[in-house]
Image: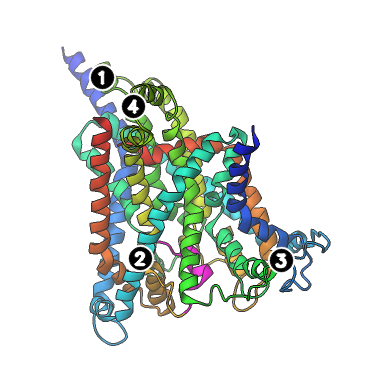
Amino acid sequence: MTTTTAAREHQRDRRRSLLLFLLAPGAAFVVAVGFLLALAVWEIWVEPSAHRTSTLSATLRDPDFWWTLERTALFAALVVPLKWALALPLARIIRTAPEKLRWAFILPWVIPPGVATLAWFWLFYDVGGGANLVLAKFGVESRAWLGTPRSAFFICAALNVWREVPLWATAMAPSISGFGGPLEHMAKLDGLSQRERRRLLVRPRLAPLFWALCLLSLIWSIGEFETVWLLTRGGPGNATEFLSVYAFRHAFLSQILGRGAAAYLVALPFVAVSIVAVLTMYSSAVERART
Amino acid sequence: MTLRRLLPIALVLLVQVAPLLWLANTAIRPERGILIADSLRLDEPVTLDNFKGLSTTSFYSWLVTSLTLATFASATATVTGHLFAFGCLISRKPLWRSVRSLALAAYLIPAMFLVFPVQLLYQMSGIRIAAIALVIVHQLFLFPVSVWLASSYLDRIPVGYVSLGIIDNLTPAEYWSLLYWPFAREALKVTFAVTFVLSYQEYIYSFVLTSSSSFITIPVGMASLQAGDVYQWALIGAGGVVTTIVSAVIVATLSRTLEKGIERSVTANG
């Protein structure tokens, strides 16, 4: 009996050690991130801005910040629907493409954003850039593509969409593979119109995927830095100064780390509301797809 | 394959790669007169001098740095993420599911926000950021992805198997070989592929934290060719082509694995 109890104790200890070994990385990660977040908040509270007001109130009182927030929201609101609109047709094309060629569709996402951005920068450069050369071929006057606020904004959006649509399409391609298969055939036999088939077969299947991609795209759009920084540095004026560029400029160029962190802290409620809304839509789409 | 099917594929691919083709055209033309505004310069001779010119910069060392950093960072994230996901599965305690959710939620924190406290730690500690430190910092965004992907595969392990494992008092080696490995083989490849690509393209942490000129990654290095008012277009073009070829090799090799990883990462756990 004692031997059995001892053996059971030993096995329990072994299992506990195994679990400790397996779970330690996750626990360490969560603690580390929590520490970093606490440090960011501490930095906001202890570091006064140049005008002797708190970092947080300096951010709240800065009209540039609110314009930046609005611009970031507009950017996200523009790129997410565009990606959805382009991704589904591209997913269909990817499904029909030879398998050996499919990797080429995802290339814009895989190459480092800096390289892709430099390619676009050169494409839209004022002198000798590809876009102006094409215009010249048709006798149209050259444009300062990146020197005009509106066109710079839309080029940033176009670059963001160009990079991420292949990702969306690659994620969606397997989900649409069932369309045209036996289920679709049965639906046709039952006399369902194409619109009805789309509503009953296509949308429920794609809805969870759509909301998951929306969430990722929302986070990435809000945090978009590299492409904007390399393309326009937030200009012309501050036409493309999104939240990450604003935070970077204050934190590292003005050397007030707290202002950078404060920008995100103030934006947090707005971002959180958007994320919660998308997550709610995602959960209900998953429930509907299950039923 | 009919022309009707081939045409949309060709058109889409052209739009996808057009900016890269433009960069490539610059890379194989002479540097002289590169800003001629009235010609696409297709009649100019093709030259590889710009690729040779890359060796006058530190481009090839940036490339090696990026690939090495991505390999180690993604290997670390893959191993730790899988260990944790497996641990959450066999632990069966709600607490660890919550910790897993917190780890996944960390991915929602924008990188630009986390870079401030990391930079602050760097300033306070006085330690120069080295390769190992950057591998650790990359875990901030790679670990959640790894846990997410690992969970999407390991959650398929029937709960009954785990219970039987506890009843049978499996040794760690048996947990590994009987429970984990059959479900994780593909997951490991997928996790490594996706985290490798994410680490390879990472810019913010490398840009802000790299203080040593001997440890610059491709994204940061390429951006430095654009510094100030001088744009070394020919070198940028050549560097862009080499980087794209490396990326193309990576994606062509890992194509099926990346596709599965991307599909899993957006549909998993739903």
Real-space CA distance between mark 1 and mark 4, rounded to the nearest whole angstrom: 11 Å
Co-location on one chain, circles 1 and 4: yes
**What element does badge 2 sit on?**
helix
Residue that extends furthest to the left in the rendered view of this protein: A1
Q: Which residue is mark 2?
A: A74
10 Å neighbourhood of mark 4: few (<14), some, or many (≥20)? Answer: few
Residue found 47% across the figure and 56% down from its top = A161
Real-space CA distance between mark 1 and mark 3, rounded to the nearest whole angstrom: 61 Å
Give the amino acid at mark 2: Leu
Give the amino acid at mark 1: Gly
Q: Is residue A244 left or right of residue A108?
A: left
Give the amino acid at mark 4: Arg
In the rendered structure, are the residues bearing label 1 and label 3 in contact, judged by CB atoms less than 8 Å apart?
no
The disc at residue B160 is 1
In the rendered structure, are the residues bearing label 4 and label 2 in contact, judged by CB atoms less than 8 Å apart?
no
In the rendered structure, are the residues bearing label 2 and label 1 in contact, judged by CB atoms less than 8 Å apart?
no
Q: Which residue is mark 4?
A: B156
Real-space CA distance between mark 3 and mark 4, rounded to the nearest whole angstrom: 51 Å
Give the amino acid at mark 3: Ala
Which of the two residues, B239 or A228, is positioned nearer the viewer here? A228
**What element does badge 3 sit on?**
helix
Magenta span: A223-236
Between label 2 and label 3, give the one nearer the viewer: 2
* Percent coordinates x, y for residue A3 in the rendering: 20, 14
In the rendered structure, are the residues bearing label 1 and label 4 in contact, judged by CB atoms less than 8 Å apart?
no
